[in-house]
Image (cartoon, rainbow, N blue to C red):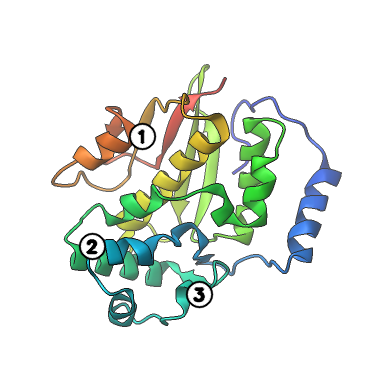
């Protein structure tokens, strides 16, 4: 899925890419198995539950997950399990947008070494390339997608392996919020997204989506992702 259409201006070095993989391996990393991802991007989840007055251990128990899941950002979880966990969180807190809110607390260090590499890339384009090439070390719940949406815009998307799974809307909300936070961290607070789209149905209230992203939020789209200026 990389690249599709006209590429962004980037350096291209197979030696550099191999070096990144060796660095991740040396740090004890391994590619996630198909259909699983590391819990790191959602490490804010237990604290969020506590802020809503909900005991995290009871939520993990209800979701049939180990209470030690959040002991390490490198612990892995299946797509089915993370969708179930986010669904339980939404129900117990009364926040249908729980996935969106936990994703909005993401920062690049939650990606471990990959996040460090992205933060120290020469350009935002190179950082995104590192994300596309190496996300499989951290997340194989879905496929990252980057393509030219128009002569002036690109689309950065997230395509789940099992898009019809129960609770998938919560996972998509979290993932697109993570992508948004990633771009803001790379480009600074002046960076603006042009459109944000979700492949799930429109929620009863879209106010929290508009507060996070602005007015250009769309639902029932073919794919979930961000549209922003290629510049």
Quadrant where the N terminus sits is: top right
Quadrant of the frame with the C terminus: top right
Q: Which mark is residue 52?
A: 2
Q: Earlier in the sequence, mark 3 or mark 1?
A: 3
Residue at screen point 81% across, 58% down: 22
Q: The residue tagged with tag 1: helix, strand or loop?
A: strand
Compute the Cα span from label 2 to label 3: 20 Å
Q: Nearer the viewer, mark 1 or mark 2?
A: 2
User: Along the polypeptide, which appears first: circle 1 or circle 2?
Assistant: 2
Residue furthest out toward the right: 15
Q: Position of residue 212 (x, y in %)?
A: 32, 37
- How far apart are the two marked residues, 3 and 1, measured between alpha carbons? 32 Å
Q: Give the residue at mark 1.
A: 196
Alpha carbons under labels 1 and 2: distance apart: 27 Å
Could you tell me residue 41's position as x and y percent? 49, 57
Q: Secondary structure at mark 2?
A: loop
Q: Residues within 10 Å of mark 3 (few under 14, many from 20)?
A: few
The residue lying toward the viewer, choosing from 8 and 39, is 39
The residue positioned farthest toward the left in the image shown: 204
**Which residue is denoted by mark 3 in the rendering?**
71
Q: Is residue 180 left or right of residue 60?
A: right
Q: Position of residue 172 (x, y in %)?
A: 37, 51
Mark 1 in CB contact with mark 2 (< 8 angstroms): no
Check whether the beta carbons of the residues at disc 3 and disc 1 lie within 8 A of each other.
no
Q: Residue at x 35, y 41 (%)?
A: 222
Image: 44 above or below 231 = below
């Amino acid at each position: 899925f990389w690249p599709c259409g006209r590429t962004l201006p980037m350096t291209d070095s197979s030696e550099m890419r191999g070096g990144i993989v060796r660095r991740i391996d040396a740090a004890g990393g391994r590619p996630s198995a198909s259909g699983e991802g590391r819990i790191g991007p959602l490490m804010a989840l237990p604290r969020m539950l506590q802020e809503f007055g909900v005991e995290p251990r009871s939520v993990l128990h209800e979701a049939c997950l180990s209470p030690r899941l959040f002991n390490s950002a490198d612990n892995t979880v299946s797509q089915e399990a993370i969708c179930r966990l986010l669904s339980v969180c939404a129900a117990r807190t009364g926040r249908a947008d729980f996935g969106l809110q936990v994703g909005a607390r993401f920062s690049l260090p939650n990606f471990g070494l990959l996040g460090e590499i992205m933060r120290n890339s020469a350009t935002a384009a190179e950082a995104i390339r590192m994300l596309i090439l190496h996300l499989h070390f951290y997340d194989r719940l879905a496929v990252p997608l980057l393509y030219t949406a128009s002569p002036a815009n690109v689309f950065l998307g997230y395509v789940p392996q099992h898009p019809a799974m129960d609770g998938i809307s919560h996972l998509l909300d979290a993932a697109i919020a993570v992508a948004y936070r990633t771009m803001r961290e790379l480009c600074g607070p002046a960076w603006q997204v042009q459109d944000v789209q979700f492949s799930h149905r429109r929620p009863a209230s879209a106010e929290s989506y508009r507060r996070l992203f602005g007015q250009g939020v769309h639902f029932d789209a073919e794919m979930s992702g961000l549209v922003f200026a290629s510049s």
